[in-house]
Amino acid sequence: MTKKVFIRTFGCQMNEYDSEKMADLLHATHHFVRTDSPDNADVVILNTCSVREKAEDKVYSDLGRLNELKRIKPNLIIAVGGCVASQEGETIIERAPYVDVVFGPQTLHRLPDLILAKETTGQSQMDISFPEIEKFDALPTPEAKGPTAYVSIMEGCSKYCTFCVVPYTRGEEFSRPAQDIVNEIEALVDQGVKEITLLGQNVNAWQTLDEAGNDLDFTWLIEQIHHIDQLQRIRFTTSHPLEFSDRLIDAFGRLPKLMNQVHLPVQSGSDKILAQMKRGYTAKQYIEIINKLKQACPSLSISSDFIIGFPGETEEDFQATLDLIDEVQFDGSYAFIYSPRPGTPAAKLVDNVSAEQKKSRLSRLLQKTDSAHINYSQHMVDTVQDVLVDGFSKRDSTQLRGKTSNNRVINFTGHPRLIGQIIPVKISSIAHFSLRGEVVTSS
Ligand code: SAM
Ligand code: F3S
C-alpha cells in the first residue's frame, strides 16, 4: 500500500519550499504521497518556525495531539524539522519522547535515512547540523506544482539583527552555486513554470566569484535567470535594505521579467530603534532606496515588515514609524508584536512596552497600512493588468485565480484552459484583500 506523509508547515516561504522538498524526497526514495490529514498518515512532519514565541508554542500543542494519535497508531513516525528543531534539539525528545526524528533546516535531505535508522534501531534520531550545500546536492529534480514556483538561492543569515533567531537556527549566509540555481529553474520551466520567486533571508546578499576571481552579485544572478527563454516572471523575497545596490535598483527599470513588486522590510521608522535592532541603516537611507526604486520603476508596489514594541520603543519612536508609512505608502505590510527570542541580544533588554501599548500600536499601524493597501487597490480598478492564471479561486472553485505583475491576487470567471497563461484582465472591483476582474477578450 502507498505510504502517506502529512506535513504541517509553520512560518515563512523558506519553510514552504523546504516542505515541498521533503515531500519530493520521500516520494523519490519511498514513493510516499502527501495527505492532508495526519489521521491517515504513516509519517507526520511538523516543519516548524521559531521566529516568534506563538509559533513555537503551537508546535508543542500539536505534538500533544500527535501523541494521542500515536497511541492508536503505534507505528506512526513523528518528525520535527525546521527552526524549533534546530533551536531546541534534544529538548524536544526530552519533552516529547514519542517524537521519532528531529532534523534541522539544513539536514532535511537526510530525512529518509533518519526515518530508516529509527525503524531499525527503535531509537529516536536527531541531526540538526549545518552541512551547507550538501542539502541541495542530495535533493531530487524539482517537480512543478503549477505555473509558479519558489527556488531557494541561499541559506541562513549573517546579519544578526538583535531580535532575530534565524542566524542561530539556519546558520550563516551561504550562497547556492549559480549553475545549480539556473538548472533548477530550467527544470521547472520545462514543466510549464512561468514565474519563479527566488528565496532567501537576504537574497541581495547572494554572491559568488567568476573563474578569474571577480565578485558576481545578486543582480548578475537575476540577469542569468532572465536569459531563460520560457521563463516570464522573476520575483524575490526577502531582500534587505543594506545590500540594495544601485545596480539592483536599476535592474527594475531595465529587466522586463523582473516584476514591479518588492518586499523590503524596514522594521521601524525610528533611527534609535533601528540602531538597537542592528539593522545597519537609518529611516532616511531606507526612504532614499524607495525613492530611487520608484524612479527606476514608477509602477513598483512595495511591502514591508514592522516590529511593534521593541524594548525601549517610545510613543515618539512609534510615531516615526507611522510617519515613514505615510511617506512610503506601502502596498502591503506584515506587522508583528516584538517577541523576545532566547539567545538573541535583544532578549536581554528590558521589555518595557506594556502589552496594552503594543496592542494599541499594532492596531493603529494596521489601520494605516490597510487603508494604504485599499487606496492602492482603488487605483488599480478599471486598469487592465497582465495576470498569470495559477489555478482556481480558493473561496469559489468555479472561479479562476491569478496574480498581477505587482503580486495582487485576482479572481475572475474564465475557462480552466487559461491556467498557466498570462492574460489581460480588467480590474472591476475590490474584494477584501483581493481583486475581482474580467478577462479582456480581443474582438
Ligand atoms: N530577512 C528579513 C529582513 O531583512 O528583515 C527578515 C526575515 S524574518 C525571519 C521575518 C520577519 O519576522 C522580520 O522581518 C521581522 O519583522 C519578524 N521578526 C523576526 N524576529 C522577530 C521577533 N523576535 N519578534 C517579532 N517579529 C520578529
Ligand atoms: Fe533575521 Fe535580520 Fe537576518 S531579521 S533573517 S537576522 S536580516
Image: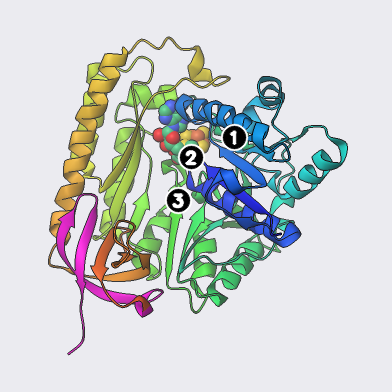
Hey, what amino acid is under mark 3?
Thr
Q: Is residue 440 above or below residue 401?
A: below
Q: Which mark is residue 11?
A: 2
Is label 1 within 8 A of ligand 1 (CB to nearest ligand atom)?
no
User: Residue 83 bears which disc, if any?
Assistant: 1
Q: Earlier in the sequence, mark 1 or mark 2?
A: 2
Q: Is residue 278 visible?
A: no
x, y percentage for residue 240?
44, 43
Could you give the CA–CA distance between mark 3 and mark 2, rounded to whole angstroms? 14 Å
Q: Which residues are magenta?
A: 417-443
* Residue 427 vertical placement versus 309 (above, below): below
Q: Was residue 426 drawn as part of the magenta stretch in this picture?
A: yes
Element under disc 1: helix
**Pointer 3: residues within 10 angstroms few (<14), some, or many (20+)?**
many
* Residue 178 in which image quadrant: bottom right
Residue 135 painted magenta:
no
Per the rendering, the mark at residue 237 is 3
